[in-house]
Amino acid sequence: MYIKGVGMTKFGVQTCTSQELVYEAALEALEDADFKIEDIDVIVSSTVDTSSNGERQRGFSSILSSILKKKVPSITVSAVCGGGGAALWTANRLDYNNVLVIGGEKLLSNNTTIITDEILMAAERIYEQTEGLIFPAQNALIAQQYMLKYGATTDDLDLVAYKNHKNAYLNPKARFYKKEVTLKQIKKSPVIASPLRLFDCSLSVNGAAAAILTKDETDVEIAGSSLFVDRLSAFESEDMVSWEATKLAAEESYNQAGITPQDIDVAELHDAFTPVELISYEDLGFCKKGEGKELIRKGVTNLDGKLPVNTSGGLKAKGHPICVTGISQIYELVKQMRNEAGERQVSNVKCALAQNIGGAGSTVTVHILKKV
Amino acid sequence: MIIRWICDNCNKKWIYPVEKCIYCKGEIVKQKGTKLKVVGITKVTIPSPMHPIIPYNVLLLQDEFENRIPKKTMKDYRIGDVFIEEKAKTKDAVSVVKVKYDIYEAIKDIFSLLSINELVKDDKLLIKPSAVMAAYQYQAVATNPEVIDAVIRILFEMGIKEENIIVAEQAIIGNDSFDAASKSGILDVCKKNGVRFVDIAKGAFEQVKIDGFKFNIFKDALDRKVINVPIMKTNSQIGLSGAMENLIRFADENTQRNMFLNGIDTTLPKFAMAFKDILTIADASVGMQGQGPLTLGEPAFLNFLLGSRNVANLDTVFCEVTMLQVPPYVQSESNSGVKKIEVVGNELDALKFQIKPPVPGDTAHPDIKVIDGKACPACFNRMFSITSKLVGLRGNQLNIVMGPMLTNDMLKGHDRIVLFGDCAISKSTELGTKPMAKISERLDEIEQLVLFKKLLTSASETAITPVDKVRSKMKNFLHNVTR
């Protein structure tokens, strides 16, 4: 299928309702596609259905039907932080002409402890939740194993955070738009779960994003679309620092698109925590195993590098509204492919990749977009 | 210990218990790793509801089969350290073991940590679960039947014969023990294992004198070795229904009433002395929080079991972990205090998080409070039953006064007092209390409900009139006819 239009809200701490968020994103996508809502044949959505935000309502598909005034087939796909990618993957396989893919989250409306607990529900309960393995702690253990195995350092993680914050500075929809973050601030930020510091962690934000998929040819084709699900807990894997689901999804998507990793011009990766970006460089084939640190050290993934990664600011600095993230990655890549990315525009983007992850490498989608 | 479930045929491995391999249909065997070393560590500095004490460490432990698990600890370790679970050194130690999908292994772990060697092949045993009223297992009112099943299995493995084991319980006054055992699933476990379930209420009792108190105690509980298997629950009347409280129902009904009449905080520790050194395996896999099973209590997903030969120590440790007040009847026995209790299996600070405590005086109805002079469970349960049925009918505040241990200080400053139960009526006469109304415990529940409704909706200090009494009797009559 092809992408006809994209839309997203600014990611932040808005106090508006979930309905208002998704309405804004849907409206922008429709206008971008030059579509009317009547043109939509089916809706595929994703939300984490948080219970702590005070809205206390589930049945996201029905909520969308109410707010968009649409009586069409509509399903909600759940894959925690990988929900957006999973929704896109589902939509791409439906036999309809025009599909609205949409995600919305109102995550920030309670105290941090409650939100931390809410997110913790994506972890395994008996082995992880009861042992205090909140997501920063999970990823801290993964980062430590990665460092021990491949000799990466916290300086490498700092560079990932610094790069993504610099990109978010240029993105009007990012939580950290025009907010400067220095390398010194990153290095001095408080430790959350050693070795990870505050600036190694992504941002919980509110927001919504939408994409309209169509069978009719447009300027952006979904050339590869894969989803793989692996174990729930990272400690179950033989190799904690290489995520099988990413490797499988990447391989399949490259084959579908008929390309190799070297053909990718720009990528949006799931940097929920800085070490995940380094591990993903390797699992996606951008470099050999253990050499992810070299890409960030040499500036290969910087905005002006050979393979810019997370030009939007990523989950790190644009923000991570759980199930919205996967769709917002597509928003960024479409903007890059159309030369509409403003100050963060990468030149001559023909082939782009989005990697979205649910859990610590559990549900992974890889989408490859090609400029037509 | 790290457990994995492995197919004996194709070696597929699970972190969850499965019974048959979904690939080759092969048999599943457990792989138990016991040689643990630290291969990763992170210090966490942000709190979450289940982990409020910071900083804490999460270790990544690896066993001799290269299986890994995370483990929370407050202690500092280094990568490469050996991780050892120390066994208890003292007789009164408490072990706390988390359930990693396998209750049987958790109980085996408790036996190992406490070095249980006092049970032998020819022992006659009594397992005392908690099943106070008819309720499903998921409601966390009764001991999880899987815990009972695992205890029986371990006893069988020790060579103890099924005919030498009984499971005995007595529901709280006014409830049927077999109904409670049946609905909770405990009766099915007994049948499955060929073990007899005995209703204590129907058994023979023997009088035991302890420190001037006379208790009629279930004879089998005195003649057999007892394994006490309570579920850990909050209790709005006495704070906690745990290891020590579970013993109360070894007493006959009169003894139970008298224990409350004479002050449960004094009588229960004395009563418990009849069961010195019994083994307790306490079920906190899913415990209860809030007001307890009678009103608005709710399951607390705690996921651990406790074991000890000392009921007071076990209750004290549970209160410490869940941040509940240690009830007075436990405090008087656990004179060493929690800091002097040896705890094995898990560190207390690593386990701690607050569950909803019971609020003394609260009922299900926002306008009805209780002033409890240690009423017996029968009256207390009836009061909760009635007040629950009045929820939704707002009115003027009522203070229900109950029990024989009332004092003028307890009643001071309260108006709209309704005496409920014969103990309270008798005691208040002695104290010279002027109540709004008196309601006898001998009235039928429907009559009591009608009278409470009248009092709740009446703005004045109206007493119950003869007309009200006739109305309540008619309502009761009609209710029975309709049924």
Image (spheres, coloured by chain):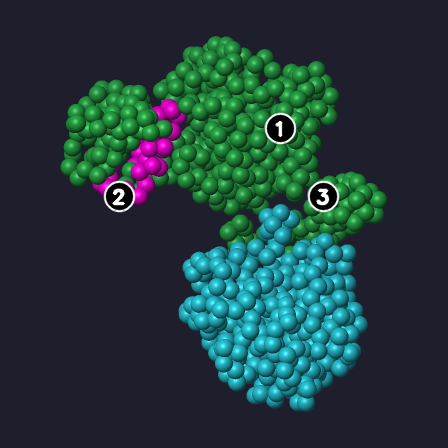
Crowd rating for badge 3 (residues with CA inside 10 Å; few <14, some 14–19, many 20+): some
Q: Which of the marked residues, 3 or 1, is nearer the chain's N terminus?
A: 3
Q: Where is residue A371 in the image (x, y as percent from the top left)?
A: 68, 85
Element carrying mark 1: helix
For the residues tagged 3 and 1, is the chain the same? yes
Quadrant including the N terminus of chain B = top right
Quadrant including the C terminus of chain B = top left
Q: Name the residue under label 2.
A: B394
Q: Where is residue B158 in the image (x, y as percent from the top left)?
A: 72, 23
> Splitting the image into 4 quarters, where does residue B405 fall?
top left
Chain letter for the green colouring in the rendering: B
Q: Which of A143 and B458 is in front in this view?
A: B458
Crowd rating for badge 2 (residues with CA inside 10 Å; few <14, some 14–19, many 20+): some
Instruction: Single out the residue that lies furthest toward the right.
Output: B9
How far is mark 2 from mark 1, CA to CA? 44 Å
Residue B18 numbered tag: 3
Q: Name the residue under label 1.
A: B189
Q: Which of A60 and B240 is in front in this view?
A: A60
Crowd rating for badge 1 (residues with CA inside 10 Å; few <14, some 14–19, many 20+): many
Disc 3 marks which amino acid?
Answer: Val
User: In the figure, is residue B100 to the left or right of A27?
Assistant: right
Q: Which residue is drawn at 68% across and 33% down?
A: B108
